Amino acid sequence: MRYPIARAPERCAWIIVIALSAVAATAKPYSATARIDQTAWVPLGGIDQWISIRGDDRANPVLLVVHGGPGEAQWPQAERYKPWETAFTVVQWDQRGAGHTFGRYGAKTHDVTLDRISRDGVELAEYLSRELHKKRIIVLGHSWGSIVATRMVQIRPDVFAAYIGTGQVASWTATLNIQFDLLLARARQEGDVSTVKALEATGRPGPADAQHFSFLNKYHFSSLWPPSDQAWLQHLRSQAAELKAREPEQFKNLEHGMEFTGEHVLPDQIATNLPHTACDIHTAYFLIQGQDDVISPTQAAVGYFHCVKAPQKDLILIPSAGHFAFMTASDEFLEALTSRVRPVAIAGGA
């Protein structure tokens, strides 16, 4: 999600991460074979929204990926999800205002809010349960998507066999405070007296400070990202020109969709305080978090995890990984999905 780094120059990385390849938005016919690989437009909340469904065996649990950003559609990363498709039927969804869905409606897209996007997600979960003949499905939320997916399981816990959070958001205020403390600690450690004085004079950001984006950029917050996230950023930057040249229309939709969605849901991000609003979760709850995440700080995510009351819950921290652990520590992440989440989800109706 943009939370709260995406208006820095590094914002291009969020655009690149959703533009690594191109896929057609044309629906493919249903096949009765064990393998499933199709795309479709599904009516959700009054508009058609783009999804893809891929997996090696239809008997596997369905795993719905709720992307971050906001607007960080994950279908361009399809090849990176291929290993997941052995144990899960993986569903990618371009949310209202994002990717292909933004391309269809553009700036005329209405009702771009956390509540509406979350209710779209519940409708999609119901659709997938019907179409793929599952009692319940698994939902995975990354970053902004963790706010959406948490709201989804609050609205209709009976549709979900398990929730997985990664790059898990806790609250806007906690994130701002932790990031401010990290910047101040670095300045003190490096003996950067002028920065220490500037930060102390500025003081902690207010609980509704939307200018924290530019604040982080001013003090080069991305340099505090763990090496794995910085490497991921460089990897994405290296592909920008090629992708823009190869798929200019799709790239434009992705970029503009992120700008559009980010502006519309910023009030919802600022208002987010899951430890106060979402501690009662009535489905199995998993947190698979990069131990060194500073974008959605792991310290805050773990604090939120401890307040969660769920029928079953599990915490998996991946060493040397950060906000993009599901991409940069893919083997460890998939191991956690298959060995920890999958059995519980199957027992729960997936």
Image: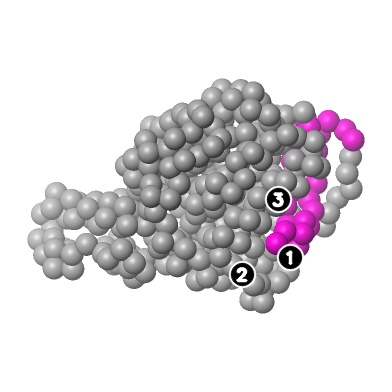
- Residue 309 image point, x, y percent: 44, 35
Q: Decide: marks 3, 2 in contact (CB < 8 A)? A: no
Secondary element at image label 1: loop
Q: Earlier in the sequence, mark 3 or mark 1?
A: 1
Q: Amino acid at mark 3?
A: Leu
Q: Amino acid at mark 2?
A: Asp
Q: Label 1 vs label 2: CA separation?
A: 10 Å
- Residue 178 belongs to magenta span: no
Q: Decide: marks 1, 2 in contact (CB < 8 A)? A: yes
Secondary element at image label 2: loop
**Label 2 crowd bin: few (<14), some (14–19), many (20+), radius 10 Å:** some
Secondary element at image label 3: helix
Picture layout, residue 148 above or below residue 246: above
The span shown in magenta is 32-58
Q: Earlier in the sequence, mark 3 or mark 2?
A: 2
**Label 1 crowd bin: few (<14), some (14–19), many (20+), radius 10 Å:** few
Q: Quadrant of the C terminus?
A: top right
- Residue 316 image point, x, y percent: 44, 30
Foreground residue among 136 and 217: 136
Residue at (67%, 77%) from the top-left corner?
108
**Disc 2: which residue:** 111
Picture layout, residue 201 above or below residue 27: below
**Disc 3: which residue:** 124
The dominant secondary structure in magenta is strand
Furthest-bottom residue in this view = 108
Q: Label 3 vs label 2: CA separation?
A: 17 Å
Q: Amino acid at mark 1?
A: Gly
- Residue 84 image point, x, y percent: 64, 34
Quadrant of the rendered image containing residue 346: top right
Direction from residue 12 to residue 198 in the image, left or right: left
Residue at (50%, 28%) from the top-left corner?
312
**Disc 1: which residue:** 46
